Amino acid sequence: MQKSMNTPLRRWTVLVIAALVMMMGYVFWDIVSPLSTTLKATPEEGGMGWTAAEYGFYAGSYSIFNIFLLMLFFGGIILDKCGIRFTGLLATGMMLGGSVINYLAVTVIPCDSYADLSFTLFGLIPSHIKVQVLIAALGFGMFGVGCDITGITVSKIVTKWFTGRELATAMGVQVAMARLGTASAISMSPVIANAYGLSAPILVGATLLLLGFVLFIVYILMDKRIDREQRASVKASEGSDSSESSEYSEYSEHSEDAANKNDDKFTFRDFLTVLRNPGFWLIALLCVAFYSSLRPFLKFATDVLVNNYGMDKETAGWVTSILPYGTIVLTPLFGVLYDRLGRGSLLMLIGCVIVTLCHVCLALPLLEHTWMVMVIMVLYGVSFSLVPSAMWPSVPKIVPLKQLGTAYSIIYYVQNIGLMLVPMLVGNIIDANTDTTGHVDYTLPMVVFALLGIAAIILSLLLMVSDKRHHYGLWERNIQ
């Protein structure tokens, strides 16, 4: 009988490589997040004199090209038409290129050079803005295109290798590795910046992205080798009966060559089919509401602790890092829970409720001690584990595999709208609530995050109802 190429060793090796590539992206995504307070300091104080609105524009620029140039749609179509190898190489290369531009912007361009913009996106983008911020945003936007396309590519890799097996567990491991990247960036960036200067963390992030680019090349070489072995195995077993060749049909969905030759290719009709799927839109909107309530909060969390609780910047960075560090263990555990017990829609609902309550607690003057803040960060981490560990493995239950790249690209596109607008909005609110001493009242920004959490709760309830009506299988376990 023909031997299956999808052995446990191979699929978990693929997962480790893909997860490490994604982790490098998340390190760079959040490498500047704990430096927001330092960036607003004057150059004489070791900062760059950025305003909160400029920092909010920079944070939101991650999504600008994805939204206005429809890069995620193109990325999803390229993935479904050209395959994982080409798309992944292109995307990791864009991440690396964007990080280099970002680094050059903060090291070469003086922070006292300004430009006047006619397009301000209804006042969300400062009309009088530093050239340094503009170029850094250009690099961060290019990085954002590469990072999100890498994300949908990695999601498709994991889905193809783990469908019918440990899918939620594998996605949980991948998300946990991404959170390790976030936690490492938030906790270590202030330490590196204090020792070597503000630009040093960005250089470290760019170096890691170079390593991620090399790792994806390793994946391509491994994938091609498996294809060659499979073709040789098929040739050697010619003339065998259909039952003996069934193992190849299992692996053929993982083979790049087989995927590109498959008659069941993605078409524009598939794109319209995705758009007409009500369950898809509920999970897409849930994604944008949940991530918009939490990821932009991480961009400002260190500054919240500095202003509201009087922590120094390094301590605030370490306390904030409790949030992603907690997810490293919890996300795979919740993935195992979903794999073995199901109840995916319930897990998403619980996570949305937790994040909303956490935002409310930080918005109101309820916390008097540092340990209380640390408990809140742990609860944030629980939420940040529950929702992704159930949400991402649920997408393949709603959308067929051949449409999956496009489906993920649309979800990422909708998510990017929130990730662009919310930081810009919050940055302007912060500037409006900053007194003459530089102290910020974070009550209103936290209310914005809490309202997004409430929207996520409503959408998760609607998804639960839709699952019962359309029988997506979100309540069922993944391991068959």
Image: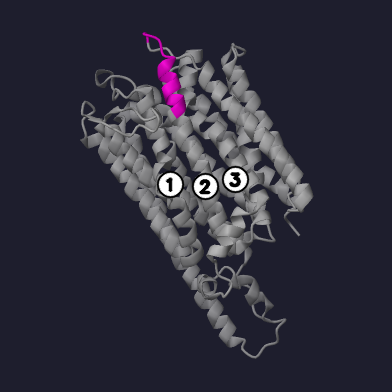
Label 1: which residue? 66
Question: Real-space Cα distance between discs 3 and 1?
Answer: 16 Å
Name the residue: 66% across, 75% down. 247
Circles 1 and 2 in contact, beta carbons < 8 Å: yes
Q: CA distance from mark 3 to mark 2?
A: 8 Å
Q: Report x, y in % for residue 312.
A: 43, 17
Q: Which residue is mark 2?
A: 412
Disc 3 marks a residue whose amino acid type is Ala
Report crowding for label 2: few under 14, some 14 to 19, many 20 or more residues within 10 A (C-alpha): many
Q: Amino acid at mark 2?
A: Tyr
Is the residue under label 1 in contact with that under label 3 (CB below 8 Å)?
no
Element on which disc 3 rests: helix
Which is more N-terminal, label 2 or label 1?
1
Percent of width and height locating residue 410: 53, 50
Give the amino acid at mark 1.
Asn
Question: Closest to the observer: 236 or 360?
Answer: 360
Of the residues under marks 3 and 1, which one precedes in the sequence?
Answer: 1
Residue 363 vs 159, above or below: the answer is above
**Figure check: 102 above or below 406:** above
Rendering colour mode: one colour
Percent position of residue 421, x then y:
46, 34
Queried whether the magenta region covers residue 436, the answer comes back as: yes
Segment tinted magenta in the rendering: 425-437
Residue corresponding to mark 3: 284
Residue 315, visible in the rendered structure? no
Front one among 361 and 245? 361
